[in-house]
Image: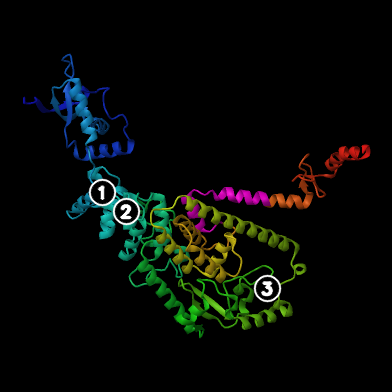
């Protein structure tokens, strides 16, 4: 085999031309900018491949290394190192094709190890970014991958997790929680998408700081720990690391969060005891808050933070009682939130003292001012429409889930659905039962769901599972937004809740219009409150159209 003639030379960029037969036609701007910064910092480490042009002009044509040539020109260099070979058009085309086809980028974990080695030799994140030409956020996220545990790292190496998802997974500091998240992210054969994975991690493995039962702006609530607002493990504190998270105010350190919950509750108890106020222990608190954060009406206590239904303005008990507040009792719910309670009989006596005997019952409609009554009526109507949207949305997400069930045996999904039925409260049983047309008390609905599960297919069981998990907070709808669990499921499954909401609003508007002006006539479309049914037809006619309908029949009767 004859040896190919080649030589390494420094070629002036003015003498380098790009041919029209380059295999690469698309040059992305961001990677080219990164390469330009690397060339500025380190020069060209790998020579380009060129061949002499025909005609002896002294110029050379690029065969491989088009991006390096463009980066050199952007960086302001005058020369570029090159390997010059004599080759014909066919050989040049083959070389250009192979150079692009067989290029393999290093695995992100290998990059992370390389960046970490540079850190050990005195470099910083900023200097690594300058040397490599990569953005600072890129270097920071690669280094974050080193915090992956064994199971998460293995799943990433097996391409079961996307690199963006692996970076989010590495921000979960608790190793057990990280392993649980890795398992949840790899239940399907194909890698989970970035948005879906972010929603799963935000919902199940990060904590909403605005719902924290402790002051998030307090330093040293736990000794040596900064406030949550200044903590680097808050999603909004380090945008280079967390990127476009769905929420900028999430905590990624569950262990630290739990420590602050206990520290906040301890401080609340110490302050209460110093005032001579009563504090309920864990067992007594659990007996009161049997359904999460909600205090049942049969508990014998009132929550000073909840609405007082006896108040025409629907203020909280604390605002209504004001300075005539009975002895306060402190307790906390299952989520760790502190509550200020009063015994119900003491609160009733305080209401009588403030407002007389009228305070013992809810205000009558006549005692409520007209504008307040109208506002309350409209809010009740809005809540009814919102519940209808939720019920239709839950039915829609279940139907969508049944059409796209994940892999797995029917027994697996029936088992998981049964576990979900057991895990939720009786409030969710009632909602799911109503959506599925099951009448009776919530506990009867639960028994029926369990009985029907045995005959369900895997797709039906998966639909029930999604429906149950989507029903969280559906029992106490807000006028501001739909329940987050339902919105998340609808987004993932492609259910258009806005269309459902528009349909419900349109039906409600039609009912109001019918009540005011009547239903439309099937023939002339004019509205009337006195529509007549047409024999052997579903049509309903207004008086005018009804008379026209009767005229031929009357003529026939007269002729007979």
Look at the picture and state if 499 lies above or below 86.
below
Q: Are marks 2 and 3 in contact (CB under 8 Å)?
A: no
Secondary structure at badge 1 equals helix
In the orientation shown, which residue stands out farthest toward the bottom? 276
User: Callout 3: 10 Å neighbours few (<14), some, many (20+)?
Assistant: some
The alpha-carbon separation of the residues under discs 2 and 3 comes to 52 Å
Residue 491 inside the magenta-drawn segment: yes
Q: Main secondary structure of the magenta part?
A: helix
Q: Nearer the viewer, mark 2 or mark 3?
A: 2
The alpha-carbon separation of the residues under discs 2 and 1 comes to 10 Å
x then y, percent, for residue 290: 51, 75
Q: Specify which label sits upstream in the sequence, 2 or 1.
A: 1
Q: Are marks 2 and 1 in contact (CB under 8 Å)?
A: yes
Q: Where is residue 346, by image quadrant?
A: bottom right
Q: From which residue to which does the magenta span run?
A: 481-507
Residue 135 visible here: yes
Q: Residue under label 2, please give it.
A: 166
Q: Residue under label 3, please give it.
A: 310
Q: Where is residue 524, by image quadrant?
A: top right
In the orientation shown, which residue stands out farthest toward the right? 558
Q: Specify which label sits upstream in the sequence, 2 or 3.
A: 2
Look at the picture and state if 487 lies above or below 220.
above
Say which of 237 and 420 sits in front.
Answer: 420
Residue at 18% across / 55% down in the picture? 120
The disc placed on residue 108 is: 1
Residue 221 visible here: no
The disc placed on residue 247 is: none
Q: Specify which label sits upstream in the sequence, 3 or 1.
A: 1
x then y, percent, for residue 241: 34, 53
């Amino acid at each position: 085999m004859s040896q190919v003639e080649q030589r390494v030379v420094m070629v002036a960029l003015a003498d380098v031309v790009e041919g029209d037969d380059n295999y690469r036609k698309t040059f992305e701007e961001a990677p080219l900018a990164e390469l330009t910064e690397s060339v500025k910092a380190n020069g060209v480490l790998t020579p380009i491949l060129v061949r002499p042009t025909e005609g002896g002009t002294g110029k050379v044509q690029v065969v491989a290394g088009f991006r390096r040539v463009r980066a050199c020109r952007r960086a302001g260099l005058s020369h570029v190192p090159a390997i010059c070979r004599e080759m014909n058009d066919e050989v040049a085309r083959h070389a250009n094709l192979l150079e692009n086809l067989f290029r393999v980028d290093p695995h992100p974990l290998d990059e992370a190890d390389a960046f970490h080695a540079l850190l050990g030799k005195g470099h910083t994140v900023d200097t690594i970014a300058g040397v490599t030409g990569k953005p600072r956020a890129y270097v920071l996220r690669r280094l974050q991958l080193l915090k992956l545990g064994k199971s998460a790292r293995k799943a990433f190496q097996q391409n079961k997790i996307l690199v963006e998802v692996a970076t989010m997974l590495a921000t979960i500091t608790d190793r057990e929680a990280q392993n649980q998240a890795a398992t949840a992210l790899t239940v399907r054969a194909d890698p989970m998408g970035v948005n879906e994975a972010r929603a799963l991690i935000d919902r199940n493995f990060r904590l909403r700081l605005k719902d924290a039962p402790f002051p998030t702006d307090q330093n040293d609530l736990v000794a040596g720990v900064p406030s949550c607002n200044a903590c680097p493990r808050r999603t909004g504190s380090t945008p280079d690391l967390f990127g476009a998270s769905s929420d900028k105010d999430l905590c990624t350190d569950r262990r630290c969060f739990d420590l602050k919950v206990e520290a906040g509750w301890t401080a609340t108890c110490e302050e209460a005891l110093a005032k001579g106020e009563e504090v309920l222990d864990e067992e007594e608190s659990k007996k009161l808050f049997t359904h999460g954060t909600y205090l049942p009406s049969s508990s014998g206590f009132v929550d000073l933070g909840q609405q007082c239904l006896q108040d025409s303005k629907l203020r909280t008990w604390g605002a209504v009682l004001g300075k005539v507040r009975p002895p306060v009792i402190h307790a906390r719910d299952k989520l760790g939130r502190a509550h200020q309670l009063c015994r119900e009989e003491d609160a009733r006596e305080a209401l009588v003292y403030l407002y007389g005997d009228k305070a013992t019952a809810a205000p009558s409609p006549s005692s409520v001012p007209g504008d307040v009554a109208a506002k309350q009526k409209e809010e009740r109507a809005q809540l009814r429409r919102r519940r209808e949207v939720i019920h239709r949305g839950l039915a829609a997400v279940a139907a969508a889930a049944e059409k796209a069930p994940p892999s797995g045996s029917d027994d697996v999904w029936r088992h998981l659905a049964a576990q979900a039925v057991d895990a939720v409260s009786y409030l969710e049983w009632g909602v799911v039962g109503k959506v599925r047309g099951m009448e009776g008390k919530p506990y009867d609905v639960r028994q029926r769901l369990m009985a029907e599960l045995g005959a369900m297919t895997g797709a039906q069981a998966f639909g029930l599972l999604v429906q149950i998990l989507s029903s969280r907070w559906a029992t106490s709808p807000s006028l501001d937004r739909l329940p987050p669990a339902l919105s998340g499921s609808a987004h993932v499954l492609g259910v258009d809740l806005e269309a459902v909401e528009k349909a419900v609003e349109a039906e409600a508007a039609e009912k109001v219009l019918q009540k005011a002006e009547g239903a439309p006539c099937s023939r002339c479309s004019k509205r009337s409150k006195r529509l007549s049914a047409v024999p052997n037809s579903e049509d309903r006619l207004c008086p005018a159209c009804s008379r026209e309908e009767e005229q031929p029949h009357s003529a026939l009767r007269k002729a007979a």
